[in-house]
Image (cartoon, grey):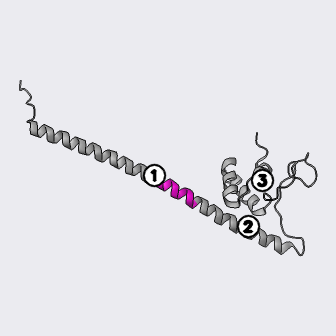
Amino acid sequence: MASKKSPPPAESKVTERLASIVDAAERTALSVIDDAEKEAKLYLEEARARADRMVAERLREEADRIESQGSGDGAAPRLRAVDSPAAPEGTAGGRAPAANGGSAAARLLATQMAVSGSSRREIEARLRDGFEIEDTGEILDAILGPEE
């Protein structure tokens, strides 16, 4: 039976050194990947917010155009909250319409998002970012129903 020879001391040191270099390179690569992923997420969030603002502005413009076309003959379609049977006349779900939450464009966007399956939280974030609506409750309750 042949006995295993241990590598010469110089070869052993070279192997250990190469192993430590490879280990350091792998750690550096993981760090670079983590940094790239963080940067990509940040870029995506910024792009999404910018797109939300652009969509909100276009929806506002379209809602204003629709409302101004109908101001003379009263025939323009208007988006409004669905009144609940128990709600007093002129209120949405028993609440008075919010001053900044009644925009037709915001309601349209929220409705589109709800139909496409977005969560209440996602819709709320888009309304806050794109329309700068602080209290989104009225719009969300009118479209999705009261939060349980």
Residue 58 in percent (x, y) is at 69, 68
The three-letter amino acid code for the residue at tag 2 is Arg
Give 9 or 54, whichever is nearer the viewer: 9
Residue occupying the point 79% across, 71% down: 66
The three-letter amino acid code for the residue at tag 3 is Ile
Within-10-Å neighbours for mark 1: few <14, some 14–19, many 20+: few
Secondary structure beneath dot 2 equals helix
Secondary structure beneath dot 1 equals helix
Give the alpha-carbon distance from disc 2 to disc 1, as whole Å: 34 Å
- Compared across the picture, whether 47 is left or right of 87 comes to left
Residue wearing tag 3: 139
Disc 2 and disc 3 in contact, CB within 8 angstroms: no
Residue 96 in percent (x, y) is at 87, 53
Return the disc, 2 or 3, that comes first in the chain's sequence.
2
For this orientation, the residue located farthest to the top is 1
- Compared across the picture, whether 142 is left or right of 43 comes to right
- Compared across the picture, whether 13 is left or right of 111 comes to left
Residue wearing tag 1: 37
